Image (cartoon, rainbow, N blue to C red):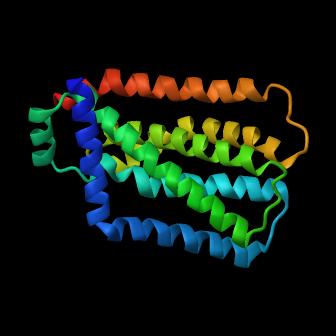
Amino acid sequence: MKNKQQILALVKKDLLLETRQQYTLYGILLYLASTIYVAYLAMGQPEEKVWNGLFWVIQLFVCINAVAKSFLQESRGRMLYFYTIAGAGDFVISKLIFNALLMMVMSILSLGVFMVLLGNPLEHAATFLFITCFGGLSLSLVFTFLAAIAAKAQQQSALMAIMGFPIIIPQLLLLMKIANSAFSSVIQGGWWQMVGLLAGLDAMVIALAVILFPFLWKD
C-alpha cells in the first residue's frame, strides 16, 4: 500500500511540474502541429501506406521530445532527494506511468491533427485509435527505459541513439504492420498474435527497467 502511495505521489509530482512548466508542453505541441503541417504542404493527402508510415515516424520523434527528457532533466541533487524518500522501483514505475499517459495523450492529438490535415483513409478508425494508444504506450516505455540508462552516462544523447536504434526500428515495423489492418475492410490473420507480441515486448521492457534501474540508482 505504501508503495502505491509513493508511486502516485511521484506521478502527481511529474504532472504538477508539467503543468507549471507549460513551455515544455507547448513546445511539444508546436513541434507536433508544425511537423504535420509541413508534411501536408509537401504531400497533401498521401496514400494509405505513406500515411501510415509517416504517422509512426512522427510519433517516434514526438516521443523522443516528450519522453526522453524525463530522466535527463533531473539534477543530481534532486535524484539524491528522491533516493531518500522513495525506492528505485517506485521511482522508475512512476516515470513509466507518467510518460505512458503523456505519450498516449500526444498520440491521440497527433491522430486528430493527422486526420484533419492529411485526410482520413481509415476503414476502422476505432481500431487505429486503439493501436495509436497502444503504440504510444510502447514507444514511451522503451524511451523511458533508455533515458534512465543514458542519464547516468556522459554522452547522454549519443548513448540513447546508439541503444535505441536496434530496439525501436523492429518495434516501429511491427506497429506499422499491426496498423495496416485499420486501412482494409478485412482484419488480417495473425493480427492478435502481433498485438500479443508487442505486449510481450512492453512487459519485457517494464521488467528490465524494474530489475536494472536499482543498480543505476545506487550509482
Height in image: 210 above or below 127? above
Is 23 positioned to the left or the right of 181 in the image? left
Q: Quadrant of residue 93?
A: top left
Q: Looking at this view, is 146 or 166 the one in front? A: 146
Give the residue displayed 78% in from the left and 74% down from the top: 44
Give the residue displayed 62% in from the left and 30% down from the top: 198
Give the residue displayed 59% in from the left and 70% down from the top: 35
The quadrant the N terminus occupies is top left
Q: Looking at this view, is 8 or 89 the one in front? A: 8
Height in image: 59 above or below 45? above
The quadrant the C terminus occupies is top left
Is 156 positioned to the left or the right of 134 in the image? left
Q: Quadrant of residue 110?
A: bottom right
Please state the total of marks drawn on the protein image: 0
Give the residue displayed 56% in from the left and 52% down from the top: 60
Height in image: 43 above or below 175? below
Is residue 152 at least partly visible in the picture? no
Is 47 positioned to the left or the right of 100 in the image? right
Query: What percent of the width, then of the height, locates residue 68?
Result: 39, 49
User: In the current view of this chain or complex, which residue is farthest to the right?
Assistant: 185
Is residue 44 at least partly visible in the picture? yes
User: In the current view of this chain or complex, which residue is farthest to the front?
Assistant: 1
User: In the current view of this chain or complex, which residue is farthest to the bottom?
Assistant: 41
Query: What percent of the width, then of the height, locates residue 49?
Result: 81, 53
Query: What percent of the width, then of the height, locates residue 10?
Result: 24, 42
Query: What percent of the width, then of the height, locates residue 64?
Result: 46, 53
